[in-house]
Image: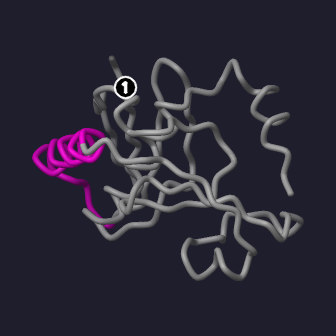
Amino acid sequence: MIDTTTLNKANKEYTNPAMHTAEHILNQTMVRTFGCGRSRNAHIERKKSKCDYFLPEEPTAEQLAEVERKVNEVINLHLPVTIDFLTRDEAAGIVDLSKLPDHASETTRIVRVGDYDACACIGDHVSNTSEIGTFQLLNCDYEAGRLRVRFKVAD
């Protein structure tokens, strides 16, 4: 099993449980809105974060405003954020494990945001979405099929 306590203590200056949990909600919202995959390239930091999504065409300003609205709607549901430890086979029936390295443990840590999202993850998270604050899309750019979304959370 992965010792996430040691890993997270070593990276504490870079972790932000509220921002990281917001990223989970953003990922699921993008999947549901555009039918794309979860972000394959995310940088989660305290002040602002970014995620990349691969889309066949650039989203409109209205679509992006709807993504921001939906993320905040989910945050405002005050959903519990829970952690389960499953075997790799059990987890594969629930989440995409393609980002896990070959040498990953047989035990997989699944983070759930209510019934809205489930993802294999070793990061720090809030215990309830009510702890996140307000999600804000700062800006986006689209080039060659890649949408880069920059965002922050504010109290």
Quadrant placement of the C terminus = top left
Task: Using the image, determine if residue 95 lies above or below residue 3.
Answer: below
Q: How many marks?
A: 1
What residue is drawn where x is 69% and y is 48%? Answer: 122
Position in image of residue 1 (x %, y %) = 86, 57
Name the chief secondary structure element in magenta. helix
- Does 100 appear above or below 13? below
* 17 w.r.t. 99: above or below: above
Quadrant for residue 120, please give it.
Answer: bottom right
- Where residue 102 appears, as percent x and y from the top left, is 84, 69
Residue drawn at 78 percent across, 42 percent down: 4
Seen from the viewer's position, the closer of residues 6 and 42 is 6
The local crowd at label 1, few if under 14, some if 14 to 19, many if 20 or more residues have their Cα within 10 Å, is many
Q: In the image, what residue occupies the spot 40% across and 56% down? A: 114
What amino acid type is highlighted by mark number 1? Answer: Val
Residue 148 location (% of width, % of height): 41, 43
> Of 139 and 121, which appears nearest the observer?
121
| Residue at image coords 58%, 72% | 96
Q: Residue furthest left?
A: 62
Relative to 109, residue 35 above or below: below
Left or right: residue 29 versus residue 41 is left
Q: Which residues are magenta?
A: 56-76
Residue 133, position as x, y percentages in the image: 33, 26
Q: Is residue 11 magenta?
A: no
Which residue is label 1 attached to? 153
Q: Nearer the viewer, residue 73 or 147?
A: 73
Residue 38 relative to residue 16: left or right: left
